[in-house]
Image (cartoon, helix red, strand yellow):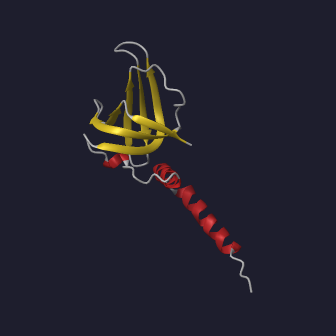
Amino acid sequence: MERNDEPAGLAARLKRGLHRLGAPASELVAADLSRDAESHGRTRRTPIADLRVRSYSSILGRLTLIVFETGGAGLGVRAEISDGSGTAAIVWMGRGRIAGLETGSRLRVTGRVAEGEDGLRTFYNPEYQLVR
């Protein structure tokens, strides 16, 4: 005799959906990024809240701010990235634009962590990969 598990599966999906309705946005972002990292086989990443100055780290997050600097001290792109645990800065010096970067993009960043002028953990000229 076959047993139909569809009602149990539906109940579980409804429960997850209701939980998401009441969850803080930072928790949802962190959960989405964790699932994304696992689906890409990239579980070796550091939560932004745990970044240590002078460590070589990889993070996975969503871009929340991008600023293209074209004057003053020179060309550069400054971005902020969040993973639900915190926010870090990314600075690419000597670049006017970086194709594919836009607010809301998911990005994997790898490099040396520094203490930025604004107190944020900052990656200068890191390796990066857009994550779909």
Nearer to us in this view, 123 or 83: 123
Q: Is residue 33 left or right of residue 120?
A: right
| Residue drawn at point x = 46 percent, y = 32 percent | 65
Q: Kindly give the residue lying farthest to the top in the view shown.
A: 72
When asked about the image quadrant of residue 75, the answer is top left
Please identify the residue farthest to the bottom as the structure is shown: 1
Taking the view exactly as shown, the residue that stands out farthest to the left is 54
Placement of the N terminus among the 4 image quadrants: bottom right
The quarter of the image holding the C terminus is: top right
Q: Position of residue 128 (x, y in %)?
A: 44, 36
Q: From the viewer's perspective, tell me whether residue 18 is left or right of residue 23.
A: right
Q: Estimate the x, y position of residue 86 in percent, counting from the top left.
A: 38, 45
The picture places residue 30, in percent across and down from the top left corner, at: 46, 51
85 or 46: which is nearer to us?
Answer: 46
Image quarter for residue 80?
Answer: top left
Label total for image: 0
For the point 48% across and 22% down, which residue is it? Answer: 97
Q: Nearer the viewer, residue 59 or 40?
A: 40
- In the displayed structure, 34 sits above or below 113; it is below
Task: Answer above or below: position of 111 versus 42.
Answer: above
Q: In the depicted view, which residue is nearer to us: 90 or 25?
A: 90
Percent across and percent down for residue 60 are 44, 45
- What residue is rendered at 53% in x and 38% in y? 105
